[in-house]
Amino acid sequence: MKNRLTIAACLPADRSRATLIARVHVPEQRGPSPALVRDDAVFDLSRIAPTVQALLEIDDPVAAIGAARALPRLGALADILANSAEHERDSGKPWLLAPCDLQAIKASGVTFVASLLERVIEEQTRGDARKAESARQSIGAIIVQHGGSNLREIRPGSPQARAVKEALIAQGIWSQYLEVGIGPDAEIFTKGQPMSAVGTGAEIGIHPQSAWNNPEPEVVLAIDAMRRIVGATLGNDVNLRDFEGRSALLLGKAKDNNASCAIGPFIRLFDAHFTLDDVRRAEIALEVAGPEGFALTGASSMSMISRDPTALAAEAVSANHQYPDGLVLFLGTAFAPVHDRDEPGHGFTHKLGDVVTVRSPSLGALSNRVNYCDKIAPWSFGVIDLMRNLSARGLI
């Protein structure tokens, strides 16, 4: 894992002009601090704000950081990155955590056509991977007949979307996933609780009873309490296809498990060099390296998303639903791996020891190793622990 946690591998291509916010476990403080990546070092930002959430609530966090002088140095960036590898960690030295803390962790579902069709397949097969290929072919034929290649250009909620919906209903394959994929309302769900996400280098968890699962590489927005989108990072919305395929009412069990949400490595704040338009143009790459030598790679573009990031943010937080501590919002994925890993027709599923890397030139790379949720150290440092820690340090 350490060879994936290097400056060259993990940082944006234009890192010299990026404002990168980290969250670091500092052993001497027995807790986390918001931090700034500058040059080849990491600096403590807790004098400016005790939490990442508080930092993002500042009117102009980039200016506040730029005006700060003599920030305490936490260590060399290369050393902190390398020490973030969970199984090779020196607990007496700093390491990276997920770069969010008190924010709600929300996610958008079915925002890309490719993954939309795979969600329908999960539903049609009731989560049975053995039936996926035949369902994929039959559904694909109907989509081509009624929507063709233009399905990806359909604007959700438009008259054209309604016409396609009617055609699919007539064929008996309308789905709750198609409803949120091309219907008027987006799917927004709770991925995990505040403080539950893991950072780069950590293990990510799959449920031990799951036999069909996959990574979901995504861009994640950082949104403050005033609904401002202030930055972006990467995430892996680990997904259990068999659980959700059995019933959408199992979404919580499919999505919210110990270490099943990875975010990082850093939040890149919006500034003159990085804006929401860069998010809209972002290219996302996925790599899975299996312990048996298996390799899976893929790439997608945020330009193919069916709902604009601002529209998804507006669905998540509005006059109808507020987040006084802000939120981080997964924007959905175009990836739903169908490459056969073992038996023909069974598609892809994780094996223990898989190393999953999500990469984007503008946001760096997030790498994690797969294990069972019940074999990963339980989540034990929550909000009350953070408050006690900050109080003991005189920060609140």
Image (cartoon, rainbow, N blue to C red):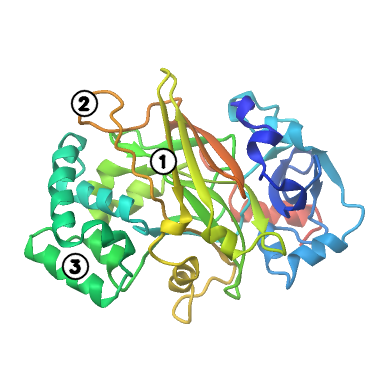
Nearer to me, 262 or 177:
177
Separation of disc 2 and disc 3 at Cα?
A: 32 Å
Q: Confirm or deny contact between disc 1 and disc 3 (CB under 8 A).
A: no
SS under mark 1: loop
Residue receiving disc 1: 215
In the displayed structure image, the side of residue 94 where residue 254 appears, left or right: left
SS under mark 2: loop
Residue ranking furthest to the front: 149
Figure quadrant of the N terminus? top right
Q: Nearer the viewer, mark 1 or mark 3?
A: 3
Q: Earlier in the sequence, mark 2 or mark 3?
A: 3
Residue ranking furthest to the bottom: 319
SS under mark 3: helix
Residue ranking furthest to the right: 70
Query: What's the amino acid at mark 2?
Result: Pro
Q: What residue is drawn where x is 22% and y is 62%?
A: 176
Few, some or many residues within 10 Å of mark 3 (<14, 14–19, 20+):
some
Residue receiving disc 3: 164
Separation of disc 1 and disc 2 at Cα?
A: 20 Å
In the displayed structure image, the side of residue 92 where residue 233 appears, left or right: left
Q: Quadrant of residue 170?
A: bottom left
Q: Quadrant of residue 158?
A: bottom left
Image location of residue 194, percent across then percent down: 54, 56
Q: Which mark is residue 344?
A: 2
Query: What's the amino acid at mark 1?
Result: Pro
In the displayed structure image, the side of residue 64 where residue 193 appears, left or right: left
Image location of residue 29, percent across then percent down: 77, 44
In the displayed structure image, the side of residue 26 where residue 266 appears, left or right: left
Q: Quadrant of residue 324?
A: bottom right
Does 57 sit above or below residue 290? below
